[in-house]
Image: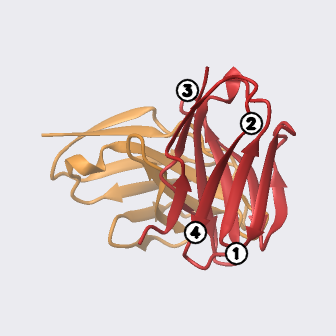
Chain colours: A red, B orange
Amino acid sequence: DTAVSQTPKYLVTQMGNDKSIKCEQNLGHDTMYWYKQDSKKFLKIMFSYNNKELIINETVPNRFSPKSPDKAHLNLHINSLELGDSAVYFCASSQSGSGETQYFGPGTRLLVL
Amino acid sequence: DAKTTQPPSMDCAEGRAANLPCNHSTISGNEYVYWYRQIHSQGPQYIIHGLKNNETNEMASLIITEDRKSSTLILPHATLRDTAVYYCIVTFTGTASKLTFGTGTRLQVTL
């Protein structure tokens, strides 16, 4: 079984559209994250949630809205997509209190045209 | 979080030990050293972490200097599958902690 899964794997869309990326973890972890890796391969944290509560928000535009329906899921909704949103988005999870051993998903490759 | 400095790239022959250095001279007393790697097009993968003592697991060994200002990740018998970008990250632990990825070291394992 995949520990951290993301859907879709690839997403191609037009500027101005709204899209969502889903993430699920079956590790029983309390904390989940979204990272963005741009074309220059810099990997940056966007958000973290602990037990469905927002913990970290790294000055991400408010077009990005994470939603955590339960602690096993952290979805990322993006409104009014822009060209600069093209990137690979990684979801991750960790068991709070056990250090920062994070388990990453396979990534969602978003291309905005 | 303390900043880390790593060489941009390294080569290693298959079967030999790969020693990846990391400088973290501004590390504070409660910050851990973490190592992750990212194989092409995949999500980052946790390798090992430590606070003060040297650590070893099935993947690698981590050697931390006594003053904690630098560390070395050792892959004892590198294989082609170990070709990846390796990230050294210093962070405190806890609910609000986060991983700040730098540019890492691109390790190329060759035949």
Dot 4 falls on which chain? A
CA gap, disc 1 and disc 2 = 28 Å
Specify whether A33 is left or right of A55: left
Q: Does label 3 lie on the same chain as label 1?
A: yes
Q: Does label 4 lie on the same chain as label 2?
A: yes
Residue at the spot 34% in from the left edge and 36% down from the top edge: B10
CA gap, disc 1 and disc 3 = 30 Å
- Residue identified by numbered label 3: A39
CA gap, disc 4 and disc 1 = 10 Å
Residue A30: mark in rendering: 1
- Residue identified by numbered label 4: A25
Residue at the spot 39% in from the left edge and 33% down from the top edge: B9
The reply to whether residue B69 is visible in this rendering is: no
CA gap, disc 2 and disc 4 = 24 Å
Of the two numbered discs 1 and 3 on the same chain, state the one appearing first in sequence: 1
- Of discs 1 and 2, which sits in the foreground? 2
Amino acid type at circle 1 is Asp
The reply to whether residue A61 is visible in this rendering is: yes
A69 or B43: nearer the eye? A69
Amino acid type at circle 3 is Ser
